[in-house]
């Protein structure tokens, strides 16, 4: 375990009180608590979290046996980074970085709940937004180093994909300007080969459905970051997965959802990939898609997903038709 002696140390009574407030305010006992009591408990917890020494709650709360308390430990880490970073000692920033990655890797290894891991991933992304910008950067190659740390502790491909999705979401919505924004965006671009490899290894029928779906969620989250050259190879794979004869409808729907995102939000949404995207989809619709419609007596998930794909394809196809008639294609 990384050194955590730089964190404030709280008394056992303070930690116990925080855990009690969480259990009373957010646990099953909430149903017997009046709204006034609930507001008071949550306000006391909020005030405790605002204190500078609240950094010392992260580890003991994460080590608590109650998952609600564990979640609040992860939440405290994320909140302190996002809201109280200016008060944190700069000389301990790298130690906090190493500790947070180790805590997350350990939580993965021992099977912490998904909602706890997601909050820890958000905390890591929040910390990266603070540490990556600058010269020299205090966290170069942060995405690769985190993925390596998680994998070394037995992190599954599905967990890696969950982390990558949150990274893209958090950095994409971060309130950054100028050089800081450019540097964070570059840190995402530096990780593209890793992300492409992670998706490629998970988009096949030999993996579990959950891993397959998580990989396509990663592709959806990163498609605005990928250059077209990295996005194009996935298109024939996705179209090939639009197989209504497959026993698992989830594969069809996940592939369709991803193609819809490519058609509407990716660098290819302007109709730039006629030969790779639009024309093959039109051929598929003429052969396979039409048979799905013909055989559908009642609306089901596959036919509904197909309709959404048609809607997404429509604007792209119309733009290409107009360009062609104008002599631009």
Image (tube, rainbow, N blue to C red):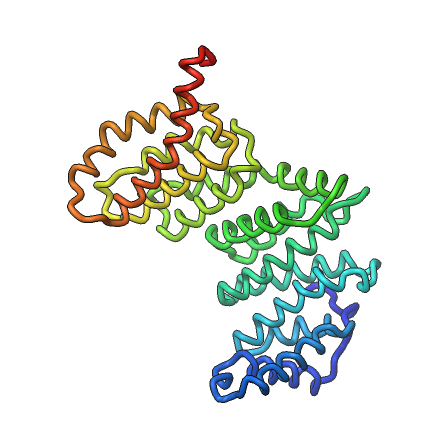
Residue toward you, 328 or 221: 328
Quadrant housing the C terminus: top left
Q: Is residue 10 left or right of 173 when viewed as pictured?
A: right
The residue drawn where x is 57% and y is 76% is 69
Labels in figure, total: 0
Please name the residue shown 54% across and 78% down the image. Answer: 26
**Which of the 4 quarters of the picture holds residue 91?**
bottom right
Instruction: Give whichever of 237, 170 is nearer the camera.
Output: 170
Left or right, residue 273 beside residue 289: right
Q: Quadrant of residue 279?
A: top left
Query: Which residue ends up furthest to the top in the rendered image?
Result: 327
113 lies left or right of 101 = left
Q: Is the residue 89 above or below the residue 146 in the image? A: below
State whether residue 275 is above or below residue 150.
above
Residue 29 image position (x, y, % from top left)? 50, 86
Quadrant containing the N terminus in the rendered view:
bottom right
Judging depth in this view, the residue of 31 and 163 nearest the camera is 31
Residue lying at 69% horizontally and 62% vertically, measured from the top left: 99
Q: From the viewer's perspective, is residue 228 above or below residue 70?
A: above
Quadrant of the image occupied by residue 245: top left
The answer to whether residue 58 is above or below residue 132 is below
Q: Residue shown at 25%/43% (left/top)?
A: 303
Where in the figure is residue 162, as x and y percent of width and height? 51, 53
- Taking 310 as reference, is 218 left or right? right
């Amino acid at each position: 375990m990384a050194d955590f002696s730089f964190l404030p140390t709280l008394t056992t009574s303070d930690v116990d009180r925080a855990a009690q407030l969480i259990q009373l305010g957010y646990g099953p006992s909430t149903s017997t608590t009046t709204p006034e009591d609930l507001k008071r408990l949550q306000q006391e917890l909020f005030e405790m979290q605002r204190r500078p020494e609240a950094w010392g709650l992260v580890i003991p709360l994460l080590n608590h046996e109650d998952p609600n308390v564990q979640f609040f430990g992860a939440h405290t880490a994320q909140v302190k980074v996002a809201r109280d970073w200016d008060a944190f000692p700069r000389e301990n920033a790298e130690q906090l970085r190493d500790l947070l990655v180790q805590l997350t890797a350990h939580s993965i290894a021992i099977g912490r709940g998904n909602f706890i891991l997601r909050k820890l991933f958000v905390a890591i992304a929040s910390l990266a937004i603070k540490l990556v910008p600058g010269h020299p950067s205090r966290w170069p190659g942060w995405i690769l180093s985190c993925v390596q740390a998680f994998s070394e502790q037995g992190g599954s491909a599905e967990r890696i994909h969950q982390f990558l999705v949150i990274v893209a979401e958090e950095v994409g919505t971060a309130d950054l300007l100028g050089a800081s924004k450019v540097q964070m965006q570059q840190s995402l671009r530096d990780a593209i080969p890793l992300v492409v490899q992670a998706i490629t290894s998970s988009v096949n029928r030999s993996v579990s459905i959950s891993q397959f779906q998580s990989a396509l969620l990663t592709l959806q989250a990163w498609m605005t970051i990928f250059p077209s050259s990295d996005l194009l190879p996935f298109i024939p794979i996705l179209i090939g997965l639009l197989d209504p004869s497959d026993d698992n409808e989830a594969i069809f729907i996940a592939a369709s959802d991803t193609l819809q995102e490519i058609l509407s939000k990716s660098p290819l949404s302007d109709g730039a990939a006629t030969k790779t995207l639009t024309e093959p989809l039109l051929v598929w619709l003429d052969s396979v898609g039409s048979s799905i419609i013909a055989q559908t007596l009642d609306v089901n998930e596959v036919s509904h997903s197909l309709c959404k794909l048609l809607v997404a394809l429509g604007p792209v196809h119309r733009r290409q038709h107009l360009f062609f008639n104008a002599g631009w294609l």
